[in-house]
Image (tube, grey):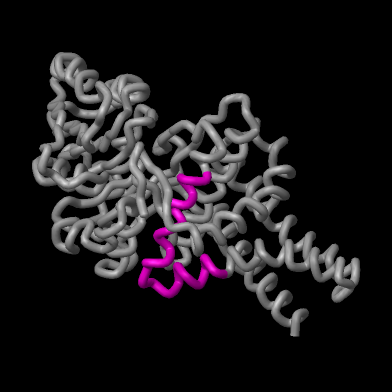
């Protein structure tokens, strides 16, 4: 019975990753046309206590290659307690000098807290046909907006997801997060091209404003503090299956920084993972369960080996199947995004990841609280 269960889970895992690998390798950035002369764009940056990051973010936005007559920028404040708003105000003149419409949308005292409320406030006043969202700790490639907008030449496209890359410093935790992020982005590409979208990142996401209103905006998962990106993607897929595209061009990538400490990293992963329990889509829970089970098997098989329930050669092939597929997928993800300098860390990250992933998966089940942006969520 144990052999059947382990073999089944590992077989499904290997098949799934093989499909994702094929999709990642065969996905190319298809230019369907240049629609930029007809569509208007609103770039929204939600921000809370981003004083240390906002200047770099806005400076990067100001360097984008785009038409000021058709692009506007909105910083949507989420009740910041530092001088984020003041710093944004210092940029109004700089954007005006380049003829950009730049708005700082401040939160009202009576307004509910949360990123989704900040986004909703900005979307209501947005004049663009297409909304592009990102985060205040991000920087952008010069052709970022153009890579999004050219996809909307196809009238069937309602949402476009883009890659988010973590720029590591010189700490192993940063390297770990950077590889993990690239792998998660590759998984997102592979899953979307299977027809079962699994993940996306609100730091690099766009959608038609009319379609956003039509499907009820952020109503799906509105009770949760996070998940504005994935819930919206799943809602879009329900109403308009096949209308979501994933960018693969490096000119479309957004770069962000890693979490600075292990505790903040764990809290971030708990926040992201806590949404899984509330998803209604069967494929999200099924694939999530398969991925978690494949990680648990690594430790379960070790225990069974010590208890002499399985032989050493069987344990060896379990490790080869699991770690081998993970390493191959990780290498492909790093090549996809040209992060060659991280290849040397693939082996230790591949070995450590099941441990950390299992810890986070179990914590999601039992831990009820986490902190985010100075707030405690229960």
Q: Position of residue 61 (x, y in %)?
A: 29, 26
Residue 63 appears in the rendering: no
Residue 170's place in the image compared with 370, above or below, is above
Write the start and end of the magenta stretch as one range.
266-289
Residue 167 in the image, given as x and y percentages of width and height: 52, 30
Q: Is residue 158 left or right of residue 325?
A: left
Q: In this orientation, which residue lies closer to the viewer: 19 or 319?
A: 319
- The residue lying at 21 percent from left, 61 percent from top is 219
Residue beneath the point at 19% across and 56% down: 212
Which quadrant holds the N terminus? Answer: bottom right
Quarter of the image holding residue 210? bottom left
Residue 354 highlighted magenta (yes or no): no
Picture quadrant where residue 47 is located: top left
Residue 137 sits above or below residue 334 on the image = above
Percent coordinates x, y for residue 54 in the rendering: 31, 24
Nearest the eye: 1 or 10:
1
State whether the magenta stretch is mostly helix, strand or loop.
Answer: helix
Res 150 seen here: yes
Residue 9 image point, x, y percent: 66, 73
Residue at 20% over, 19% down = 86
Is residue 316 found left or right of 233 in the rendered image?
Answer: right
Quadrant occupied by the C terminus: bottom left
Tally of numbered discs: 0
| 6 versus 50 height, above or below | below
Question: Taking 276 as reference, is 114 above or below it?
Answer: above
């Amino acid at each position: 019975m144990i052999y059947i269960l382990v073999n089944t889970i590992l077989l499904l895992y290997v098949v799934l990753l093989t499909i994702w690998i094929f999709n990642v390798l065969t996905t190319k950035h298809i230019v369907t046309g240049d629609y930029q002369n007809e569509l208007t764009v609103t770039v929204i940056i939600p921000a809370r206590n981003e004083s240390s990051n906002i200047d770099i973010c806005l400076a990067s936005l100001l360097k984008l290659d785009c038409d000021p007559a058709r692009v506007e920028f909105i910083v949507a404040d989420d009740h910041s307690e530092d001088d984020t708003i003041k710093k944004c105000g210092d940029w109004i003149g700089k954007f005006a000098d380049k003829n950009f419409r730049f708005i700082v949308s401040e939160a009202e005292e009576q307004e509910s807290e949360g990123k989704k409320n900040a986004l909703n406030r900005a979307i209501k006043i947005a004049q663009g046909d297409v909304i592009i969202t990102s985060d205040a700790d991000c920087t952008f490639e010069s052709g970022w907006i153009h890579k999004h907008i050219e996809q909307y030449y196809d009238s069937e496209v309602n949402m476009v997801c883009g890659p988010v890359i973590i720029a590591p410093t010189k700490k192993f935790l940063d390297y770990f997060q950077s590889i993990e992020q690239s792998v998660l982005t590759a998984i997102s590409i592979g899953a979307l091209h299977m027809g079962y979208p699994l993940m996306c990142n609100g730091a690099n996401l766009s959608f038609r404003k009319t379609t956003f209103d039509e499907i009820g905006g952020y109503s799906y998962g509105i009770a949760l503090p996070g998940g504005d990106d994935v819930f919206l993607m799943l809602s879009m897929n329900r109403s308009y299956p096949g209308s979501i595209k994933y960018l693969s061009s490096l000119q479309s990538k957004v770069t962000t920084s890693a979490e600075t400490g292990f505790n903040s990293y764990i809290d971030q992963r708990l926040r992201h993972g806590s949404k899984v329990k509330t998803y209604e889509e069967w494929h999200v829970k099924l694939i999530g369960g398969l991925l978690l089970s494949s990680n648990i098997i690594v430790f379960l098989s070790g225990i069974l080996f010590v208890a002499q329930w399985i032989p050493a050669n069987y344990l060896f092939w379990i490790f080869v199947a699991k770690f081998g597929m993970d390493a191959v997928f990780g290498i492909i993800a790093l090549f996809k995004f040209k992060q060659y300098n991280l290849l040397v860390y693939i082996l230790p990250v591949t070995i450590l990841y099941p441990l950390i992933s299992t810890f986070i998966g179990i914590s999601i089940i039992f831990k009820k609280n986490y902190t985010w942006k100075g707030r405690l969520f229960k």
